[in-house]
Amino acid sequence: MTIKHLFEPLSLPDDCQQVLTSIDGLCFVSNYLLESQAPESHPEIKILSNTGSIIGHFVTHGIGFKYSTFEVHVGRLDRLTFHSSTSKNITGYFIDCRRNSPSRGRRLSMEFTTSTWRKLIIPCGVAHTFENIEGVVTRNDLTLFADASNPTWNLLNDVQFFPCTTEGISNAPEFDVNTMEIPLTASTMFYGVQRQLLKGGQPRLSSEIQATIAGKDIRLVLSSSQDSSATAQLPSIENGPIGCYFSLNSFSSIAEASWMIIPTTESCVADWVIIDMEAEESVWFSYHTRQTVFHTFLDREGSAIILEVADLRVGSSTFGRRAVCRFTSNPRFHIRIPSGVAYRYTAAGLHAVRVEYDMFIDSNEPRFDLPPMGADRVNLPAEMLDTADGVNPPNLPLPASVLQMMARYEYETTELNWEKDLQAERVRLRNAILR
């Protein structure tokens, strides 16, 4: 872009996780990363960026992807975490378009590298665009806002666009933004509607622009021909365990080979895990005793992956059956693996995986607590698959609201433990200095 000279520059150090900027509310804050290095499984890092009180989706950016417009939301606060398989330098451009903001009209360009250790918070009314974002996956843990003084606002007309040109920037619009946070139940319902509308994919490309015609400001929706990469070929698991299959996500095309991926489950709860899947014969199989999981491979589209599955459910019509499936990474579909089905992936290098789940309990299982997230995962060596005791997974699904509560509890517990460890380190350093 040739607009850098119009913006106040800010360069973010690679190890900086929290920073305030000259635009009110625009900042980076920390994520929490949980690392797993069990010798019998692939090394993985779980990224906790979502508090459980909000909802979110993923966006992938294909080769050659470029933004040509700024976008600004009247009723949506974005929390963006940027990931790429190799570190990338990104430049973000921001303009405060809020009519009553203390930093009204301020422009800022920010250079930073992709890092899952931090997320960028973009308030309602701050226009933004990004440069050099091809090959990057973003997770957006967003919050929606409404306002009684803005009755004409709705989610369908929330976003406004203007061009990334000198003229567009000089004439950037101003807005009165929404201020009342929409409850989680309503936000979840919104994603439920999107999930149905985009089920199986929306392959046509479209963009919106703000224009003045005959003295009237109007919004134009421009549609192009179908994305040539939009048709997804679903793999199949031949003679595999019943209930274990590939299925299309709900998604929309935002550009050639670039996708917005909507949550699959009713709860919208999803983990984001970076897994080192380098082929190792020593890696064991895993299965879940109470979770049905949905895996979406978000990055490295087209790379080869091998999935092995084995049915350990004693009540299943395919009990004891094993199968192997070879497929290529594609964010437009997910793999459904029921509880009690053991699985193992083999691939090259790091992969970013969205892990969604439905959780079940037994109707004869009295309990007054919530089963911890991920505590039902069992690892099993390949040579024990044929002799392993079968499992009887429960079949009473937990409500979506309970899963959201569990996600919130996990985040808050991690945050508390993180702060305790940080405080203990501060005390240790202070005592060392005073000696």
Image (spheres, grey):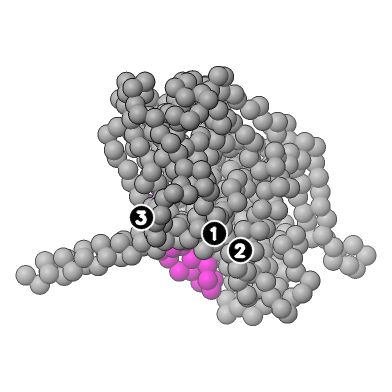
The residue mark sitting in front, 1 or 3, is: 1
Left or right of residue 56, residue 307 in this image: left
Of circles 1 and 2, the one toward us is 1
Q: In 3D space, how far apart are the residues under numbered discs 1 and 2 (Cα atoms)? A: 8 Å
Amino acid at dot 2: Thr
In the drawing, what numbered circle is on residue 15?
Answer: 3
Relative image position of residue 4 (x, y in whole percent): 58, 58
Residue at 66% across / 67% down in the picture? 75
400 vs 343, left or right, is: right
Q: Check the image and report above or below for 70 versus 63.
A: below
Q: Amino acid at mark 1?
A: Ser
Q: Are marks 1 and 2 in contact (CB under 8 Å)?
A: yes
| Mark sitting on residue 401 | 1
Taking the spot 67% from the left edge, 30% from the top edge, the residue there is 232
Numbered disc 2: secondary structure: helix
Secondary structure beneath dot 1 equals helix
Q: Is residue 190 magenta?
A: no
User: Magenta region: which residues?
Assistant: 16-33
Residue in the foreground of this view, choosing between 247 and 274:
247
In the image, farthest residue toward the front: 364
Residue 155: give x, y in percent of width and height.
Answer: 72, 62
The image quarter in which residue 173 lies: bottom right
Location of residue 135 with respect to 128 vertically, above or below: above
Camera-nearest residue between 366 and 162 = 366
Q: Is residue 166 above or below residue 199?
A: below
Query: What x and y, as percent, mark residue 51?
Result: 47, 61
- Using the image as rendered, state which of residue 139 and residue 293 is in the foreground: 293
* Residue topped by disc 2: 185
